[in-house]
Structures are given as C-alpha cells and as structure tokens.
Image (cartoon, rainbow, N blue to C red):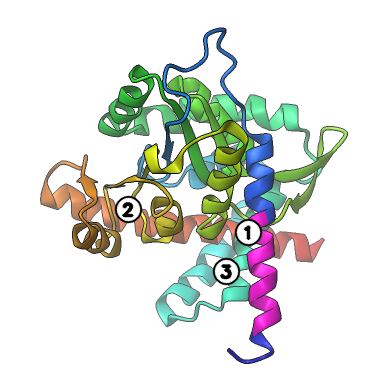
Amino acid sequence: MPSAERPRRLDLQQRSVLAGEAAASAAEVETALVAPADPTAAAFFDVDNTIMQGASIFHLARGLYRRKFFTTKDLLGAIWMQTYFRVAGVEDPDHLEKSRASALSIIEGRTVAELEQIGEEIFDEGMAHRIWPGTRAQAQLHLDEGQRVWLVTAAPVEIARLIARRLGLTGALGTVSEHVDGVYTGRLVGDMLHGPAKAEAVKALAAREGLDLARCSAYSDSYNDLPMLSLVGDPCAVNPDSRLRAHARQHGWRVRDYRTGRKAARAGLAAAALTGAASGAVAVGVALRSRRR
C-alpha cells in the first residue's frame, strides 16, 4: 500500500468506528417491563430496499423539498451534475463521500424536534406504503421468538428510530448528526453509517447488550453490507443485488426475494439505481447551495 494512502485509509477506518460507536450509543433500547425471552440473540435489518422499497433518505429529501428546505434550481442543477458522474463513470471517492455527508446539511440550523415532527408526516406520506410485507413479517418472527430487532441504516438516526417505532421494533442504529442544545450543526459524528460503519455499530451494540453474534441474524439487499452480514451466524440476503446474491449462494446463506416476478425484480433494480442517483443528486445540490452561501 503506498505510504500516502495508508493514513487516509486509517482515517476512514477510525471514522467508521466512531460512526458505529455513536450509532450504538444513540440507539433506543427496548424498555419493556419484561426482559426479552431470548436476551443473547437479536436481528439486524438494513432499511433501503430491504425493509422499504427505495431509499429512505430520498423519501426524506423529497418531503423536505416539498417543504421548501431547498429550491428547484438546486435540485435540477444537482441532477445534471450527478447524471454526469454516473454516465461518465467518474466516481471519485472523495466526491462521493462529501456528497453523501452534505445531504444531511439540509437540516443545519434546524432543531431535532422539528425534524422528528416533519419525519412523522413524511413517513405517512411517502414511506408507510413502501414497507415490504415479507421483510416486515420476518422481523415479526424474531420478535415473536423473544428476540430484539434493530434497524441498521445510513439514514439519520431520528428517521431510523421513527421507522422502527412505527413498525413496533426494538430500536435503530443510524447516522448520527451533531447537535448543540437541540440544534443541528450540519456535521456528522464520525461518518455515514454505511458499509464497515454498520458492522462497527452492530459490534458496539452487541457488546453493550450482551448479544452473542453467532446466534444473531442480519438482513440486507446490498453487497456493501457484507461486513455486517458476515458478523452474524445467520445472514440473509433480502431482495439482493447480483453481487450479494452470488455471494449468498456461494456461502449457503438464506436468500429471500419479496419482489413479484422477474419483470418486477428488474424494475425494482432499475428503480433502486434511479433512487440512488436522485439521492446523490439531492446531496450534490445541497453542497452547491452551501457553497453559494
């Protein structure tokens, strides 16, 4: 590894650990009067295209756009730029990292209470009807077996908690945004809860809650979540992308596809790609807006 790359990779790893620890610390733990019947086993579910059709942060951004958090000009300019990067195949890691992080700068200067209230409205408008019944039923099976169930997502932890609460789950691990006196600063604690950071969050939560990861389950649609899936004794690929499906088959993992038919599956993959582009576009648009300020 070139010497110039080593500090950068170490920095990214440290940020992933920090993001995971922050998510675990912020996780809402079940406060039932009776302890779970199976306290050492739990299930961890990704959200986007696993629990919910599409990207939760895209649905959030769309709801915020409707509420004038940013302008049409910002959005159109961002779509053009993001399309260029996608079509040209130029995906600079630093650009992608900054664009993802800048998506949360939409809420800079807003209060936590405001986002939580708006999040309730946005869930009812654009998320509730997008929950996959099959995945929801799978989560309920774990609850019925006396196990706790957490969502693990790159979405803001406030939105992740909301989804978990609406679905009757234990709690959620999500991206933690810094706030002072209840007001967002526009910065993240660590990094987005994505890829390796999800695994760090699960490990930190397991240590805190006394979970035996060999007895735990994890569910995701994305090959990017391989670090989290590989942590547990019972990984499951849900509505998987092609790379995760191949990996799951090779290693004998469970595969569940709740999309209806091959045509719908292909449409779902195309929609996911468009959602990713649109979500990234919103992020770039926010970054442009911030620079103009």
Q: Earlier in the sequence, mark 3 or mark 2?
A: 3
* 285 or 60, nearer to the observer: 60
Specify whether residue 52 is in view.
no
Image spot of residue 70 (x, y percent): 66, 49
Q: Which residue does the image show at 82% across and 32% down from the upper left?
A: 182
Q: Label 3, on which residue? A: 96
- Amino acid of disc 2: Ala
* 142 or 286, nearer to the observer: 142
Image spot of residue 283 (x, y percent): 60, 58
- Amino acid of disc 3: Leu
Residues at circles 3 and 2 in contact by the CB criterion of under 8 Å: no
- Amino acid of disc 1: Ser
Left or right of 90, for residue 188: right
Q: Of helix, strand and loop, which one carries label 1?
A: helix
Please rate how many residues cluster around mark 1, counting C-alpha atoms within 10 Å: few if below 14, some from 14 to 19, many from 20. Answer: many
Q: Is 88 located above or below residue 195 in the figure?
A: below
Residues at circles 3 and 1 in contact by the CB criterion of under 8 Å: no
Left or right of 17, for residue 212: left
Image spot of residue 198 (x, y percent): 53, 51
Q: Is 48 located above or below residue 29 in the figure?
A: below
- Mark 3 to mark 1 CA distance (whole Å): 15 Å
Which mark identifies residue 16? 1
Please rate how many residues cluster around mark 3, counting C-alpha atoms within 10 Å: few if below 14, some from 14 to 19, many from 20. Answer: some
Please identify the residue farthest to the top as the structure is shown.
Answer: 33
Magenta residues (range): 6-17
Q: Earlier in the sequence, mark 2 or mark 1?
A: 1
Which mark identifies residue 271? 2
